[in-house]
Amino acid sequence: MVQRIPKGRPTGIGKHPVDVIRVSDPGPKRVVDGAGVSGVDGDHVGDGRHHGGSDQAVYAFAREELDEWERALGRELPHGMFGENLTTRGLEVDASEVGDRWQVGSALLEVRGPRVPCATFGERMGERGWVKRFAAHGRSGAYLQVVEPGEIRSEDTIVVTPSGSGLSLPTYLRAWFGDGDAARAALDSGALTGERRAELEQIAARS
């Protein structure tokens, strides 16, 4: 669903519950007809430079975390409020490690990294200092790659196959925000390759 955030830019961050979604690998991050590419059929990615593509094909966030934020903010946060494609229950999403695989419905997904909060997220929430507050909390949910396409239904169970990579999502998130020790730990894990490894090498060098 395409919406507009306060500054008027089109965005797909507003999600609404559905009974079933179909997921597939969208390929590399790119802009097509002015928008990015998502791994979820019908999902709109407004900023194709920074969002979408294989490593950010599907976004999962725990309902338990939304409940915690409800209490902290004193407001209701429905499923999809944080822009997640999957709102999970009974799974500690932020305990995931890069490379873990999730079998859910007929789809096979792989954890690729944490959600790094952006200005669009901050505008949607309308909370002062939201981006910094969310990042500091350190439990950002998981971006997943689609290894095998398929359909995911609301009642499906997620079966996790651990990767043993040792690179947790909170460590990876701290690395993105300039924590040198976290960046070096992420690099030492061997779980990152290509562009993502190169970016963290720059962070580690600067620190």
Image: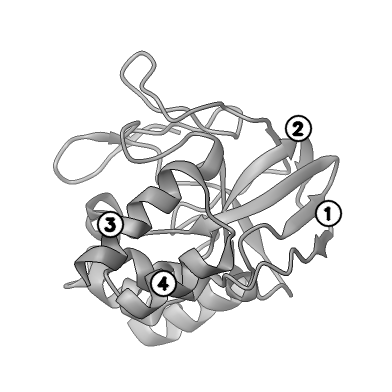
Between 88 and 165, the one nearer to me in the picture: 165
Q: Say which residue label 2 marks.
A: 149
Give the amino acid at mark 3: Gln
Examine the rendered structure and indicate whether residue 26 appears above or below residue 8: above
**Of the residues under marks 4 and 1, which one precedes in the sequence?**
1
Q: Horizontal and vertical percent for residue 85?
A: 57, 48
Between 153 and 192, the one nearer to me in the picture: 192
Disc 1 to disc 3, how far (Cα)? 40 Å
Dot 1: element:
loop
**Of the residues under marks 2 and 4, which one precedes in the sequence?**
2
Residue contact at pointers 4 and 1, CB within 8 angstroms: no
Disc number lying in front (4 or 1): 4
Q: Residue furthest bottom?
A: 71
Dot 4: element:
helix
Disc 2 to disc 4, how far (Cα)? 33 Å
Examine the rendered structure and indicate whether residue 111 appears above or below residue 70: above
Q: Say which residue label 4 marks.
A: 184
Report the colour scheme: one colour
Between 198 and 84, the one nearer to me in the picture: 198
Q: Horizontal and vertical percent for residue 182?
A: 40, 76
Residue contact at pointers 2 and 4, CB within 8 angstroms: no
